[in-house]
Each structure stands twice: as C-alpha cells, then as structure tokens.
Amino acid sequence: MKFAPPVTLLLFLVPVLCGVGAVLLPAVGYFPALDLYELSFAPIKTLLRTPHLTSSILFTMRSGFSATVISCAIVFAIFASFSGGGVIRSLRFMLAPLLSVPHAAVALGIGFLFAPSGWFIRIISPSITGFSEPPLWLINPDPYGILYILALVIKEVPFLFLIALAAQNADNSPKALITAQGFGYSRRAAFFHVVLPTLYQRMRLPIYAVLAFSLTNLEVAITLAPNRPPLFSRFLLDLYNAPNLIEQTIAASAAFIQILLVLIAIAIWRSAEILIHKVWRLMLMQKKIMQYNGTQKNTAQQKISSSTKYICAKATDISAGASGIAVCILGVLAISLLPIWSFAKVWRFPAAMPQEWSSNLWLEASSRILEPWGLSLLLALAASACALVLCALCLEQETRNKNNMTEKSLDKAIFLLYLPLVIPQTSFLFGIQILLFSIAVPVNLIILIWAHMIFVLPYIFISLGDNWRELDKRYKLTAQTLGYSDNRIMFRITIPILLKPLLTAFALGIAVSIALYAPTVLLGAGRFSTITSEAIALASGGDRRLVGAFALLQAITPCFFFVLALLIPHIVWRKRAFMAGYSYS
C-alpha cells in the first residue's frame, strides 16, 4: 500500500514530463535518431516562416477563449439564477448524460445538424426556404469556427456544471447563500458576493483544463474546424504526418510552441481573474462609501433603478435557463441523428426523415465495425481497471496517513493530477513517441493501454476522491475494535460500501478512454484503429450512414457501462437498499 503513490507517479507523471522534455531537444535541432547532433534554431526559424502560422495561432486563441468564456458564463448564470432550486436538479438530470458522450460523437452529430443538407435545413425546406436541393453554403466547416465553438460548449458546459455542483456542496455554499439572503441580498447578489469567490477557487484548475483542451483538441478540430486557417493542433498533426522525416524537428518546434500557447493563455486568464477581482472590490468599496456618506437617489430614480434591476434579473433568469436547455436540446439532437443515419436506406433532401429504413449497413459493415470496437473496448477496460486500482490504493494510503498530510500537500496532489489535462496532448504524446523511437521500443498494445491510462487516471481519481475521503470514519473505528486489520477493513468494508462510486468512476474512465483520439493516432503509428479514429477518418467522406454507425457505437458504449454502474449496486445490495445508493456526490 505504501508503494502505491510512488508507482502511480512513475506510471502517470514521469511519462508526461519526459514527453515534454523529449520535445524540447528536437525543437532545437538535436535528434540523434536522424543523425542530428548539433543544437540549432533552424527548425524554429523554418516553422516561423510557415505560411498562415500567425493566423492559425490567432484563430486557435480566439476559438479556445470563446468556448471557455461562453461555457463559464452559462454555468455561472445558471447557478446565480437557480442555485438551491429544483431547476438545478433538473438540469443536472439533463446535462449529466452528455458528459458520457465522446467529443467526436457530438461533433459528428453537430455536423449532421448544421450541414447544408442537415436536419435543420430539412425541417424548414421547402416550405420556408424554398430549397428543393441542398444550398451551396459554406457551413460545415464554417470559416469562423462557430460550429467548432458550439460543439466545445455543448461538451464543456456539463463538465463545468457538475464540477461546480460538487464544489458548491463541498463548501456548504447553499447554507451561505441562504444566510446572505437573510441579510437582504437577492439570490443573484448573494451568489456573486458570497458563493462565487470560494466556488471559483475550487473550479480554477478544471477551468484551466477546459481552456487547454479548447486550444489543443484534435477530434473536434478535424471534424468541424476550418482548414484555412487551421487550428494549431491540426497544423501540428499535419507536420507530424509529413513524409519527410527531417520535418519531425519542425513538428517538435510546433509542439513546443503549442505548450507556450497554453501557458500564455492560462497566464492571460489568470491576469483577467486578478483584474476582475480588483475591479469588483473597487466597485464594492465605492458602494460602501456612497452608503456611508448618505448619498441617496430621489424617489423617481429609485423606482427606475428598481424596475431596471427587476427587468435585468428576469432577463438573466430567462437567458440562463434558455442557454442550459439549449445545450441539452442540441446535444440530444446531435446524438439522436446518429442512429437515424445508421439505419437510413434512402434519405433524400429535403425529407425530414428517411423514406426507407434498413439494417443492411450494420450487417455488411459488421466486420469493419467490430474490430475497432473490440480494440476500443479492450483499451478502455484495461486502462480503466489499472487506473481504478491505482487510485483506490492511493486514496486508501491517503486516508491512513491523513494525520501526516496538510491541506497544501493535498492541493499539490490535485495540481499534479490536472497536469496531463493542462499540458497539450499532442505535444507531450509527440515527445513520448520520439522517446520510444530513440530507445527502440516497438509500438505495441501495452504502450497504447499505458497512454490511455495517463488520461483516464485523473478523471477516476477526481470522481472517486471525495467519496473515499468522506466515508464515515466510524465504520473503520468499529471494525478496528473488532480486530480487523487495515487491509481487511478496505476489502470487507470500504470497497463494498463504495461499490457505486467505484463502478461510476470505472464507467467514467471507460468513457474517457473511448473518446481518446490523439494517443491512438500519435502512439499507435497507424497500426491500431479504434471506433473514434475510424469515425473521425470517415467524417470527411461521403457515406453518412457509416459515419453514423461508428459514432453511434462510440456514444452508446460508455452509456452501457454507466447503466451497469447504476444497476449492479442495486442487484448486489437488493436486500440492503441504503447500501445500493451510498454516495456523497
């Protein structure tokens, strides 16, 4: 048990740091595998002379910041308007399933919705638009990246919403909100003055992870982002796939620049946090000074001010609720189109639904679909199982040494967990690929499972951590008085009680692994195909039915395991109902 944390760091953190280090040397011309032994800035200079590099960087920064700002604004507006009410519970019920759907499946569904021959155009044609054939519009991909930002928002809002919900419950924010309202604050003012400062501190690292993902993801970029200018992650992948091996040094330089872009973006975001905090405090001080000096408005001004505040408050409530519902509806519609396309035999424009249905596609393409699906399932099960065991052992060791751990050490551990989520995937995976190539390690399934585990482990640890730490200590004390050892308590009491959180974390790990694209492409060297890599490869083709089949299988596989995570505890503890639903989250 004592060796669990160091082993986890060795398998989880060291590869990330080594990958970043392995990128730096080829970026400055040192690449022994290609007989390059002299340090040189030639690769960086060549990269800087690449056409459209500046426009690609600016477009990436604009898209990444836009998606993150919009997602945060929607989540904070929802909590400010409906915190402590039934709307939050309803939105949790609607948004939580979207978290299990991979980004690529949502991106493909959004493409089906908004394409010139997509469903939105179909339902208003020809009665409203007069179109009897698809219009020649440049919508997917659109030159401004609007669909790309929309797809990111649909996936990021559920993640940030659930993170905010967990952070709010951990800080007893509902009680603080009620107390502030008792002093005369409105619900929105109480949220922004009392709840948001502490809530945001707990959400800072997840928001940084969302920002980093918006700047560096590949699967959504390939599906929905424009090619001119390309997002920087797409630009990096093109350099990596270049036939000339010498260009690998240029790709390493691009990977290094991508790391700098993420660091600069986080620094900009952090500077904005500090600036907003100072401006907010200045406004509050100015308000207090006005109250202290007795500065008051006349009756007419007060009436106008109160009516304006009322109108703004109602507009905020309507906008917050509408945005949350819109995210749910768009996500559900995007996923719903996948089975329709996969079973459509004849679906001519402008018909809103297929004229003929058939399952022949599934029968004809079963061999092509089952092989990548089987590999995806194998990778997901193996990576999630390894990560779950490591996380459980680390959390058990943490609870046993809780007296020796300070809050700062826990914060450092959480920061290390978010490191692979903040550092660009394509950058450090490219570095790991260079490192494996340099030491002549062949690409195999073990390497791929290990790469998936790097991304799965943080999500499992975050999902399981609060439940493990908040388990009632009286269970352990009672067992110790009966002579149980620590290991026996873990296997006979802790794990059975936490069966539901353990299975939920395992299902979340499978969802994360199924959605991974960059590790398969960069470390698989083209020898391994998963349903995600196949779906994205087919996205640029013309057979929407086959794309729909792959994307549907990609979407329903994680959902199946989430359903099992809910059913198994009820079956195992069918005679002990309180055990089946045991969870603090």
Image (tube, grey):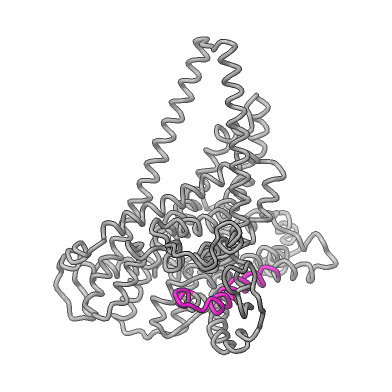
Residue shown at 17% from the left, 64% from the top: 45
Q: In this view, does 556 lie to the left or right of 253?
A: right
Image height check: is 444 above or below 291? below
Image quadrant occupied by the N terminus: bottom right
**Residue 522, x across and y down, in percent:** 38, 75
Residue 393 seen in this snapshot: no
Q: Is residue 157 left or right of residue 572?
A: left
**Residue 555, x across and y down, in percent:** 60, 70
Q: Is residue 232 left or right of residue 157?
A: left
Read off the magenta span.
Answer: 536-563
Residue shown at 26% from the left, 61% from the top: 52
Q: Residue furthest right?
A: 575
Residue shown at 45% from the left, 68% from the top: 223
Q: Is the magenta stretch mostly helix, strand or loop?
A: helix
Residue 7 or residue 148, whichever sits in front: 148
> In which image quadrant can residue 315 be found?
top right
